[in-house]
Image (cartoon, coloured by chain):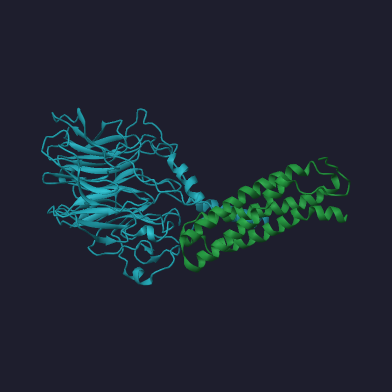
Chain colours: A cyan, B green
Amino acid sequence: MKRRSFATGVATLALAACNEEPGATQMGQAPNLPEPRRGLLPDMTIPRPAGWGDDMPIVPQGYTITAIATDLRIPRQTLLLPNGDILVAEGSGGGAPVLRPKDLIAGFIKSLGKSDVGGGNRLTLLRDADGDGVYEIRRVFAEGLNAPYGLALVGNTIYVANQDALVRFDYVEGALEAAGPPQLVARLPSAINHHWTKALTASADGRFLYVGIGSNSNITERGWPAEENRAMVWEIDAATGAHRPYATGLRNPTALTIHPDTGQLWAVVNERDEIGPDLVPDYLTSVREGGFYGWPYSYWGNHVDERVRPQNPERVAAALTPDYSLGAHVAALGVAFSTPAMGPAFAEGVFVGMHGSWNRTPPSGYKVVFVPFRDGRPAGEAVDFISGFLDDEGNARGRPVGVTVDPRGALILADDLTNTIWRVTAPGLA
Amino acid sequence: MVAIATPGLARPLHPFHAILLAFPLPLFLGALLSDLAYGANYHQQWANFASWLIAGGLLMGGLALLWAVVELFLLPRPQRRWQGFYILALLAMWGVGFVNALVHAKDAWATMPEGLWLSIATVLLALLASWMGYSRFERGDVR
């Protein structure tokens, strides 16, 4: 009896050792989905903040990475302006109340993996006036915002998705500061704001704005009423501010973008926790108008989540399967389509910024990957584009968030742990 | 007041010990009733109530357990055996209650049905521990 229990223990250890980084089986169109499981204690592995020392993030050979701005205040998303200036949204929102003893404990543990800097609630403008790759001019473009996150430019208007409202600024090319205070376009669902980030992009013709609104819980544990108008993408009429749900069942759509050729809306979505290290994969998907993507009833199409009561078989049957798995718990927070100027290996596809896991051993994410596309669809295996954010001891030297492509051939990455903006340039560009 | 220790006759529970011991049974019972309510209507707030009630039962039950352990060394030798059983009952209640707290930390319906079974077990163990604790005086008397 004793021997058997020892053998079981060894088997358990061996299984635990099998929790490798989600590789080929977890990424792509048909991820391997194990059975849901959860022990008495959730897996929590928080990589602690660590410095870079003399190291730098790892980029493909021939590419160059530099930190173009440091000491920001929680940079999340960036926007490239027509003259090459970069706008950085800085902020940290949320503040969902403690409902259970668990919230106290989990909140403390997660805070160990984050920057202790307060959110800036502002937009910072970075300019490289002489084109040498050094962003020597830095100004506060606008301040007094409420946890700004999503950014979009339409014509002469800059749209900013605060955690509670979509606002706009008039923009004149070359301006270093906003001409006036922000104008309200539409209020956004902000009660509780368990997932507070409001992702933003504009339709190709600029008539509509798409706003990603995350769920108010992991899996409805804050109650059903809290989920009204959550876990969906809103379409907002830029002229009137009128909104309608564009797609639903998207647990936490953290970044949105439009395919440059097809005009199709794409999103990266963070999926649910606490049913195992390899469930549920975060994903990249085209967002179909009127589509329902499963949350909370099911995941990856029709895989029912038994934690949800009452269940809804009709909704489960209607749930769409996402296009491309990014791996469980990678926390994709940034997405941007590439351009041929990024080099032949990265000419067609999307870059995805992965903030990194807090509930998986070993940690996953903590890098920027490139998902190749062909004919407007993901085609092939994702490859690392920026990595090295975890050191040998498993500590975090940075946490990637938003990614933006500079059409001249550079990728802009916001890092909210080291409060840095990184810029990766293709061979041949300063 | 003068405390007189008569061999063979148990001292009654210290009032503070009695107050601490008064908490676990009603709190764990409240958690069980909350679990039943959650199962009946899927209203998440009942699961939240259960979580806090269990946490409260563990806090006060833990203090009662601590008191009982300290007291073990102050009691006359003949009563230590009985105190030992009482401590074991409290310990079992606390241990099962702690596992129940972890189960109740799962999200939404993931707490069920294990949470309900553990809540029932915790209530029964709290009943046993309270019975043993409060019957000490009587028991000493009889002897």
- Residue A402 image point, x, y percent: 27, 43
Instruction: Identify the residue shown where x is 78% and y is 56%.
Output: B135
Q: Residue furthest bottom?
A: A314
- Residue A391 image point, x, y percent: 40, 36
Q: Residue furthest front?
A: B1
Instruction: Identify the residue shown where x is 75% and y is 54%.
Output: B134
Quick one: A112 or B126, which is closer to the camera? B126
Q: Left or right? Give the position of A42 relative to A285.
A: right
Instruction: Identify the residue shown where x is 44% and y is 43%.
Output: A110
Instruction: Identify the residue shown where x is 27% and y is 35%.
Output: A421
- Residue B61 image point, x, y percent: 65, 50
- The reply to whether residue B128 is in sight is yes
Quick one: A184 or A42, which is closer to the camera? A184
Asked if residue A428 is positioned above or below residue A289 in the image, the reply reads above
Q: Left or right? Give the position of A28 relative to A17.
A: left
- The reply to whether residue A24 is in sight is no
Quadrant occupied by the C terminus of chain A:
top left
Quadrant occupied by the N terminus of chain A:
bottom right
Quick one: A349 or B7, which is closer to the camera? B7
- Residue A333 image point, x, y percent: 31, 47
The image quarter in which residue A233 lies: bottom left
Asked if residue A413 is positioned above or below residue B50 in the image, the reply reads above
Quick one: A158 or A13, which is closer to the camera? A158
